[in-house]
């Protein structure tokens, strides 16, 4: 049985647009949080892509127009994610983002809706990010939990937006709309929503038509000059989980947020970047 016949993900959908172009759509209601089942699906997909010399482009989008990937699932038992296979030997999320960033296939995030926390970190680990001008929202709100971003945002943002703006994003913990994200370099480009899907599909289709080896070689050179060593990223994960385990502020903030509708299709999830300061600092 082939991979495409055997792969039965529960929290994402794989669409084969062509032999060289795969589309992966996140689908984990109510708000596309990143928990163990989704991580399991991603790890299985990454294992296939690491040995695949046909797929040139993987485009990641969302079945939910309001949420690309909301953030890490704070209600899940982290031990479940850590029990999954980790070819790098790193913690679960670091394993996913490091492997994602090293694929020979070109990876593109098509961000229509909210990508915060680990959702933003997933997008940062892909090669390119295109955003809906009107509907995209990106941000790293971990400082509101008295924690560092655990998936490597502190290592990837400076190369994209510069040192000062990386500090602004990570220390402010607030949201960035599509226009500002484009201006900062957080995303490659913000496209008016009415043209968004057509643009990203056309771009992905164009790139998918090139020679596989040429794409891999281009990626390897760009990565050589712009990526941190892999071993840097587990340090971010360790710092996040240390805060989760040892800082009372983390647990207090999480409890307050759940009381106000965290991980539900409620106003809080739409405005978390703005609201977290008032909740965490009260």
Image (cartoon, rainbow, N blue to C red):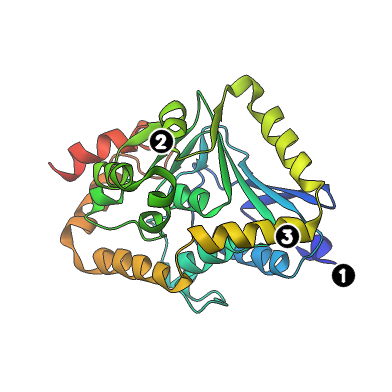
Q: Residue at x 67, y 35 (%)?
A: 200
Tag of residue 184: 2
Tag of residue 8: 3
Q: Is residue 161 left or right of residue 242?
A: right
Percent across and percent down for residue 95 are 51, 69
Q: Residue at x 54, y 64 (%)?
A: 224
Around disc 3, counting alpha carbons within 10 Å, would you say few (fewer than 14), some (14 to 19), or many (20 or more)? few
Cα distance, mark 1 to mark 2?
46 Å
In the rendered image, the quadrant that contains the C terminus is top left
Percent across and percent down for residue 112 are 55, 33
Res 236 seen here: yes
Q: Nearer the viewer, residue 160 or 135?
A: 160
**Does residue 280 lie above or below 73 as drawn?**
above
Q: Dot 3 lies on which element?
A: loop
Tag of residue 66: none
Cα distance, mark 2 to mark 3?
38 Å
- The residue tagged 1 is 1
Percent across and percent down for residue 23 are 71, 46
Counting residues from the start of the chain, the first of labels 2 and 3 encountered is 3
Which of labels 2 and 3 is toward the front?
2
Counting residues from the start of the chain, the first of labels 1 and 2 encountered is 1
State the residue lying farthest toward the left: 282
Q: Dot 2 lies on which element?
A: helix
Q: Residue at x 71, y 28 (%)?
A: 198
Res 37 seen here: no
Which of labels 1 and 2 is toward the front?
2
Task: Look at the numbered discs 3 and 1 and tell me whether their residues touch, using CB distance below 8 Å.
Answer: no
Counting residues from the start of the chain, the first of labels 3 and 1 encountered is 1
């Amino acid at each position: 049985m082939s991979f495409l016949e055997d792969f039965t993900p529960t929290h994402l959908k794989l669409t084969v647009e062509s032999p060289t172009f795969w589309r992966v759509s996140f689908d984990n209601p109510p708000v596309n949080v990143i928990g163990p089942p989704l991580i399991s699906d991603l790890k299985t997909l990454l294992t296939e892509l690491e040995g695949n010399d046909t797929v040139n482009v993987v485009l990641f989008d969302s079945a939910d127009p309001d949420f690309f990937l909301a953030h890490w699932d704070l209600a899940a038992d982290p031990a479940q994610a850590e029990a999954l296979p980790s070819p790098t030997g790193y913690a679960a999320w670091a394993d996913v983002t490091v492997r994602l960033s090293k694929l020979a296939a070109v990876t593109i995030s098509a961000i229509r809706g909210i990508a915060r926390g680990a959702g933003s970190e997933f997008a940062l680990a892909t090669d390119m990010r295109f955003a809906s001008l009107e509907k995209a929202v990106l941000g790293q709100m971990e400082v509101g939990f008295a924690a560092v971003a655990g998936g490597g945002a502190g290592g990837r943002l400076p190369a994209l937006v510069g040192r000062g703006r990386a500090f602004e994003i990570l220390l402010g913990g607030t949201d960035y709309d599509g226009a500002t994200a484009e201006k900062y370099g957080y995303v490659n480009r913000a496209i008016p929503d009415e043209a968004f899907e057509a643009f990203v599909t056309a771009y992905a289709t164009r790139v998918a038509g090139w020679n596989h080896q040429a794409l891999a070689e281009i990626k390897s050179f760009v990565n050589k000059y712009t990526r941190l060593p892999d071993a840097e990223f587990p340090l971010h994960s360790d710092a996040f989980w240390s805060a989760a385990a040892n800082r009372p502020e983390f647990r207090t903030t999480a409890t307050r947020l759940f009381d106000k509708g965290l991980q539900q299709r409620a106003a809080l999830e739409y405005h978390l970047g703005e609201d977290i300061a008032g909740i965490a600092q009260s």
